């Protein structure tokens, strides 16, 4: 048998026809949530995303995701985001257990005889491609990933007869002696598909939970004389199955640590990994420094020598080199090289801060394009504006972009000087080198080089 399975594995490696089934239809009642379990998020992605990403990283292109009606509509988007382009969502209704989920999967998949079928629970977000690959390369009819876990535990126990695996018993069906076993079933398997098809129909729900257990196929393989080999998961945290919100938080902590370590190894200084909240797929250059209590998510990208934090949140932010962002929020926006943002600034809505720009205390910038060298250092709202190079926007300046019905744009030319506490009533066009006095309420366009003061602002005579 081992020889046959080994040859099959060899064939698969040649034509890359390994398929995977992800079991993700369970109700997840222990989460006590209206949201299905595998859609709960850690580090900015749903649990299911991580499983699909690991399969992609392991080079498995064909994946069937067994789902319930609540998960089904989300599978495509999650799979695409994980880079898994051929995921097929299969409805299991009702959900009668992992064995039943597998019966549904096999009824859906055209037989691929002689091939190996990778099967895994959808609630193991810490799974890594390396373990998937190792499981697939074990030459046997069934490779079963096992891990030593701390007791007490709700995992299925691996019962051995001497060295040989005999069966898996679910915690709820286990005897006291069996509950004392420390070797657990991780929920990741590589099955010889033909043997699995022969075995799966015979499952019976005669157990404590009244469910069809996929784990009953393990004993069935052994009784049929098929080779069943353990694959050691190594660190048990990598195969943590998330069943409730306590386990979700523990998995998120482990994942966060892993993401920080990847970036630290790639040259990022992280002052306090325990309070640094990164998501997958970030691009952080060498010599970036992240200070405590900082979250970075979406498709953010940070250039070399920039310093982010403390107390900062970045989402879909493109940050250049040598930039500094502290105690601030930057969303969907771009900061140029040498930009200084914060403390306590909010940049959002597709804004751009040019090279060397300075956005200071209590300044909000929304849907605005600030050219290089623009400074808005204190207490301002800059919204729907285009601001020219080297403009200085005085403390307290507001672009009054909303007339109660519509938003309007403000354009400010290069080298303009906007006095403290100016109200710029849009639509408005302020010319190059123009100036507004402190407290000006500007309701009409200002020409190049013109100076305006007062409320409503009027033009001052040109300086002689
Ligand atoms: C399962 C294993 C257990 C193992 C543990 C590892 C079984 C019977 N038990 O237990 O041996 O130690 O995982 O984490 O397999 N699901 C479906 N359809 C269903 C029921 C469940 O798709 O009808 C999915 C769930 O969404 C979940 C996965 O299967 O992703 C495992 O189900 P779960 O109920 O979490 O099983 P455990 O009790 O954790
Ligand atoms: Ca589970």
Image (spheres, rainbow, N blue to C red):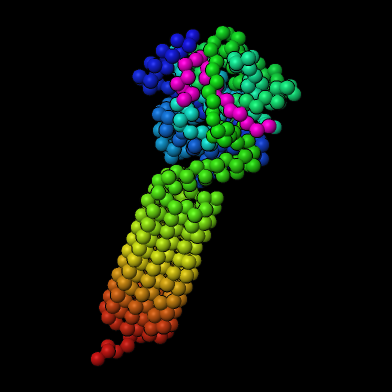
Q: Is residue 18 above or below residue 382?
A: above
**Residue positioned most to the left:** 464
- Which residue appears at 35% of the width and 57% of the height? 321
- Which residue appears at 63% of the width and 42% of the height? 245
Of 31 and 340, the residue lying toward us:
340
Q: Is residue 124 magenta?
A: no
Q: Quadrant of ligand 2?
A: top right
Q: Is residue 353 above or below residue 376?
A: above
Residue 10: percent from left, percent from top: 39, 16
Q: Is residue 425 visible?
A: no
Q: Is residue 148 magenta?
A: yes
Q: Is residue 368 left or right of residue 40?
A: left
- Which residue appears at 37% of the width and 57% of the height? 305
Look at the image and tell me in which quarter the C terminus lies: bottom left
Residue 95: percent from left, percent from top: 62, 27
Residue 415: percent from left, percent from top: 30, 75
Q: Is residue 182 left or right of residue 61?
A: right
Image quarter of residue 360: bottom left
**Residue positioned most to the front:** 162
- Which residue appears at 60% of the width and 42% of the height? 250
Residue 130: percent from left, percent from top: 46, 30
Of 92 and 57, the residue lying toward us:
57
Magenta stretch: give its range.
134-151
Q: Is residue 64 above or below residue 206?
A: below
Image quarter of residue 384: bottom left
Q: Is residue 38 above or below residue 319?
A: above
């Amino acid at each position: 048998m081992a020889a046959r399975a080994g040859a099959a594995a060899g064939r698969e490696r040649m034509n890359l026809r390994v398929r995977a089934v992800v079991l993700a239809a369970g109700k997840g009642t222990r989460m006590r949530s209206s949201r299905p379990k595998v859609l709960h998020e850690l580090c900015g992605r749903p649990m299911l995303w991580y499983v699909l990403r690991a399969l992609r990283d392991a080079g498995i292109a064909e994946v069937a995701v067994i789902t319930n009606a609540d998960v089904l509509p989300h599978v495509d988007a999650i799979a695409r985001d994980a880079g898994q382009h051929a995921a097929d969502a299969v409805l299991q209704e009702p959900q009668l257990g992992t064995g039943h989920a597998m019966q549904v999967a096999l009824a859906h998949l055209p037989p691929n005889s002689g091939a190996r079928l990778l099967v895994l629970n959808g609630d193991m977000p810490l799974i890594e491609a390396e373990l998937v690959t190792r499981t697939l390369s074990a030459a046997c009819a069934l490779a079963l990933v096992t891990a030593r876990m701390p007791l007490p535990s709700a995992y299925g126990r691996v019962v051995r007869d001497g060295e040989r695996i005999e069966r898996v018993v679910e915690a709820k069906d286990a005897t006291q002696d069996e509950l004392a076993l420390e070797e657990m079933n991780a929920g990741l398997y590589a099955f010889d598909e033909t043997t699995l098809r022969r075995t799966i129909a015979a499952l019976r729900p005669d157990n404590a939970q009244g469910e069809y257990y996929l784990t009953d196929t393990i004993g069935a393989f052994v009784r049929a004389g098929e080779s069943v080999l353990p694959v050691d998961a190594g660190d048990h945290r990598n195969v943590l199955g998330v069943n409730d919100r306590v386990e979700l938080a523990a998995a998120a902590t482990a994942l966060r640590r892993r993401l920080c370590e990847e970036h630290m190894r790639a040259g990022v200084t992280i002052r306090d990994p325990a309070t640094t909240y990164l998501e997958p797929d970030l691009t952080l250059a060498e010599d970036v420094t992240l200070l405590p209590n900082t979250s970075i998510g979406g498709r953010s990208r940070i250039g070399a020598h920039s310093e982010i934090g403390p107390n900062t949140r970045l989402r879909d932010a493109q940050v250049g080199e040598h930039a500094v962002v502290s105690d601030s929020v930057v969303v969907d926006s771009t900061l140029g090289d040498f930009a200084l943002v914060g403390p306590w600034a909010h940049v959002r809505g597709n804004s751009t801060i040019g090279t060397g720009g300075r956005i200071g205390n209590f300044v909000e910038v929304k849907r605005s394009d600030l050219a290089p060298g623009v400074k808005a250092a204190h207490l301002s709202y800059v919204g729907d504006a285009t601001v020219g190079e080297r403009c200085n926007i005085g403390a307290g300046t507001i672009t009054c972009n909303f007339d109660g019905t519509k938003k309007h744009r403000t354009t400010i030319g290069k080298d303009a000087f906007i006095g403290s506490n100016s109200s710029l009533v849009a639509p408005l066009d302020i010319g190059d080198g123009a100036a507004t006095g402190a407290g000006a309420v500007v309701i009409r366009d200002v020409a190049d080089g013109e100076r305006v003061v007062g409320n409503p602002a009027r033009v001052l005579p040109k300086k002689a």
